[in-house]
Amino acid sequence: MSEKKKNILQMGGILAVILLVCVLFNLKYEGRFLSGDNLNILISHAIIPTFVAWGLCFVMACDYTDMSIGSVLVLAANAAGALGSTQLGYGGVILGGICTGMLLMTLNFLIFVYTKIPSWIAGIGMAMIYEAAAIFYSNYQLSKGSTIAQLSSEMRKLGKPPFIYIIFVLGLIVAYLIYNRTEVGLNIRALGNGIKLSESMGIHTVKTIIMVGIICGFFVGCSAFLNESYNARVNAKTGLTSLAMIFQPMAAFMLAQVLQSKINIIIGVPICSLFVYGIFNMLTFMGVPSGTLQEAVLGLIVIVFGILAQRKETKVVK
Amino acid sequence: MEHILEVRGLCKYFGSTVANDHIDFDLSPGEVRGLAGENGSGKSTLLQQIAGIYRKDEGTMTLHGQAYDPATPIDAIRNKVGIVVQELGCLSNLPAGVNVFSGRLGQFKNHGILDMKRIYKEADALFETYGLMKVPLHKPCSQLSIESRKMIELARALSSDPDILILDEVTQSLSQNNRDMLYRLMEKLKKEGKTIVIITHDLEEMLELCDTISVLRDGHLITTKPCEEMDTDEVKRLMVGREVSSEYYRSDMEANYQKEVVLEVKHLTVPKEVEDVSFELHKGEILGFCGLSDSGIHEVGKAVYGISKNRTGTVTLHGEASVEIKNISAATSNGMAYVPKDRDGEALMMRDSIASNFVLPSLGELQGKGIFLSPKKINKMAREGAEEFQVKCSGIRQKMEGLSGGNKQKVNLGRWLLKDLNVIVLDCPTRGVDVSVKAYIYHVMSEAKKKGLSMILISDELPEVLGMSDRLLIMKDGKVQGEFTRGNRFTQEALIEVMV
């Protein structure tokens, strides 16, 4: 049997098992799990972190780790909310999220590339700074007797069907093309082999690393304005709690990495994101409390998928 | 004849080390130039400056009569200078076809999007044009053998239709059939008036292929002479600066080992790689394995040592009691060792010190108080090892990545030979090392053989396996195709007949 056929059969088998579990679960909970409303919530919930996971695909491909993505997301969501409340309208929502995301992530990567500090350390430092900025903003708003940026209900259409689906499809196309079909996408992936080797291949490494920030910032920004549109507001975080905001996208990314040999990682990310959220949704149905046990399950998922992703890492030289 | 490249007073410094010291170097069109020198003599540095990997610190270069100072390898490629480097290689997570054009993918853009079909088509055409061994172009390089990756690097260098092609220790990664292919290719390029510069530690090969040879020693260009005026002894003398024994290999022409079987391999099979291989290894025997590319010789080494997870068959070590070797742990704890082909990737901790690398297989013997290792014992073992195996270094705390290929291999091999071993599997032990280190490794092997150590010697170099083995197994398509015992029919011709 050809490798391709084998892959299709394996993927088919996995999907069939997942579907069967969903159907049985649906039967147990009297058809509420696969109801239109629940599926709508499930998919919308999965789309928002999918954008962050796409951003992570680029960051991880070049062997960097940015722990400040969650705090960037908070600031970008607030910028989207603030600009969305001005005359700019939906343009402000989109531009506020994307521009802030791109600006901050570019700043991060400029720091990584020029200071040579390991990215995960510099990322934690930046997360502290961004969290503090969000708190300053929040306190400033409070001192004025206002709250943090909040979108009015008529400005929240981007977070609802059909717009959220349209944005998702556009995001998928853009992410797929950049990752697989552009020079910068392939150069970013080349960076994963080390700076020295990439340079010897004629790749402008500094420019490429900064491009990672810009691209990741774009996707984080998209996730931010969708988040703001869906939830109306995104609260400021303190004490590095913003780090937890990337755990769900991270779990989706890692699972997609496991499946990479069978399905392109950019396509795999939303599928895996849906899978992760499906588990959360099931846990909610089962009455597992959110915030405690559900978070523990998330931690477990991240570890299990991380292990699986490592297992696929074969560097055997014949 | 007018020179295509003229280098004058070229200097390159790495900190206080002078890698190239005022080098004058000319190349003519249609010339095949060999570059000889010990590890660390500055050969690769010189060529990497010409190919834009390093920037020169002093001196001038002129290409086709124009000032030439490539800032990047892409600059060099634009000026039709291509290189296949010794160590760096391919971007392992990208498809082979993309690797051929990496750094120059812009030419395949169509409204900002890459035309992937065209990339693969042009890469395929390149392989076809130059008659290179076919490689699955859609597969990531990480899934390809070293040999296939070298083919990708070669295709990459040829993709600019270079006027100067630099081959830095390429042949040592190739099996006999692909070496022959490369020789044919070099002949074709020479006829087309292209210039080729080749570095190889196989001096006979260099003398056969080249028109002229330049010899470097300690960063200086000692001489450039036509090949007709030189022989291997003369090249070695110029390289080292003194007379070097021309006798590399064993001088005895009879197999010489004890009757006692120390290792018994029965029906060893690794799906798609090795098929039903059985053999016995005797005390004090050097058992050679050779074959063409993808013949399975390297996989046999891995399987015997227990690295291959999905192997079947049995590997039994006979000593005071017989032990079945099912995994690496069983192998190491019963006096087996393995020196892999990919030294930097699979054997050594490149970012760690010589001391750490030396003591790694012997940690059990270096216990101090309680659960702690004894720094005294560690330093003693590392210092004695570095001394015994003549590792040229600034001290045992020096990082491995700063050592030359030959010295890395001395650490790699030496750390095992310090132990009391029964069997050692050596996969291409002299890959990428110069003549003097090569001679030293063969000497160390001969000494170990005399002490009763049994060795499995896997090699892509026929003279090496012929020169050192007592018995030879020839493999093809994962199976043992023939067996030779040291004696009258122990010739390259007889071997090649079975290999192909």
Image (cartoon, rainbow, N blue to C red):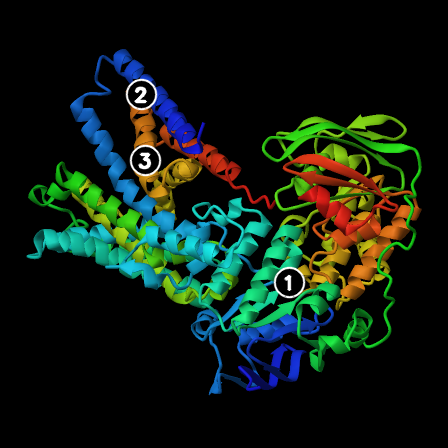
Give the spatial CA distance, label 3 vs label 2.
Answer: 16 Å
Bin the neighbour count of mark 1 within 10 Å (Cα to Cα): few under 14, some 14-19, many 20 and up: many
| Rendering quarter of residue A282 | top left
Q: Position of residue A78 (x, y in %)?
A: 21, 52
Under tag 3, what secondary structure?
helix
Q: Amino acid at mark 1?
A: Glu
Numbered label attached to residue A273:
3
Q: Nearer the viewer, residue B113 or B491?
A: B491
Give the spatial CA distance, label 2 vs label 1.
Answer: 55 Å
Bin the neighbour count of mark 2 within 10 Å (Cα to Cα): few under 14, some 14-19, many 20 and up: few
Left or right position of B496 against A182: right
The quadrant of the picture occupied by the N terminus of chain B is: bottom right
Numbered label attached to residue A169:
none
Q: Position of residue B17 (x, y in %)?
A: 67, 77
Q: Earlier in the sequence, mark 3 or mark 2?
A: 2
**Residue A289 visible in the picture:** yes
Left or right position of B285 against B125: right
**Residue A124 visible in the picture:** no
Check disc 2 and report the residue beneath it.
Answer: A19
Q: Residue at x 36, y 45 (%)?
A: A241
Q: Which is in the foreground here, disc 3 or disc 2?
A: 2
Numbered label attached to residue B169:
1
| Rendering quarter of residue B34 | bottom right
